[in-house]
Image: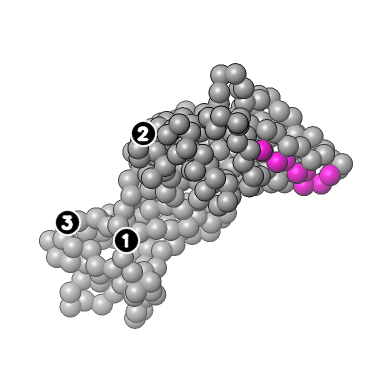
Amino acid sequence: MMSWRWRSFAVSSALAMAMPLVAGCNSGGSGNTGSPTPSEMSGPITVEVNQSRDQYGKQAIQIQLTNTTDSPVTVTGARLHSPLFEGDISWEPSAGSLELPPRQPKSVPAVLPAATCNTSADESTELKADVTHSTPGKDPVMVSTSASDPFGVLERNAYELCIAAEAAAVATIVLDPGLELAADGRTAVVRLVITPATPGGTRQSLTIASIDETTLLAQPPAAPWPRNVAVRADRQEIPLTIRPARCDPHAVAEDKVGTLLPLRVAIGERKGVLKVAAPNDLRSRIYDFITDACAG
């Protein structure tokens, strides 16, 4: 059964995706030194969640740590606790520690664990953080504090992870690595391949309601992409004719999500976006196609 949190996702997702994605800087470190003493008092570091553009669709986020004091602070680990995920969201510096200059933030990457897909309406959504840090001349301490997620990054990613997990239970959906070029080079065809998880068996219904265009790929008016495709019990191949969505000089050079195809799907009662990434070979072919088609 879909909780109130997921029913409200469509509105909050649109707002979250419209917000700027801020890429942070990270530095190295690995593991804590000493035995930090837990504290429930708010410390000198504030914690905020964000997501850089190149992390989008990869279930990775940025944890922004801000030193609110006038002295440097050394951080040796950070951990977020959210009921949206089955485990903690953790970061440890690969080089031992990370120094936060006075009054400055730094962002560090963290991989998201599996999402909790059956949360109840009355469950707390409070986001908490444990940060292990030290100040000059003092031993490391672990401070528990509230964290913020102003753009709804965790809710959006948790929902997408649940959509992906439920879709995978019905069928595997991938892009074939091949690319078929038209004779004039202005359009090409990619193939969406759908393989049922249990061929011929009983499964939940899965429908591809529509396919969104991307920053690089658009559908030609003469060959629109299909809508309301019901996933069958046998293997399917769906040809998609593509054209360049843009031809400015930086389209390919600065691309982050242009080859990540968003499918708007319905799985039982749940609706959302399932992102299908082009494999490396296809991504390279698409970049070459865009470059040549725009130059022609």
Residue shown at the point (76%, 37%) measured from the top left:
236
State the residue in front, 187 or 271: 187
Q: Earlier in the sequence, mark 1 or mark 3?
A: 1
Q: Position of residue 194 (x, y in %)?
A: 72, 41
Q: Is residue 193 magenta?
A: yes
On residue 26, the disc is 1
Viewer can see residue 2 = no
Q: Compute the Cα span from label 2 to label 3.
A: 38 Å
Helix, strand or loop status at disc 3: loop
Q: The disc labelled 1 sits on which kind of residue? A: Asn
State the colouring used for the structure image.
one colour
Residue shown at the point (31%, 53%) measured from the top left:
24
Q: Earlier in the sequence, mark 1 or mark 2?
A: 1
State the residue in front, 104 or 251: 251
Q: The disc labelled 3 sits on which kind of residue? A: Arg
Q: The disc labelled 2 sits on which kind of residue? A: Asp
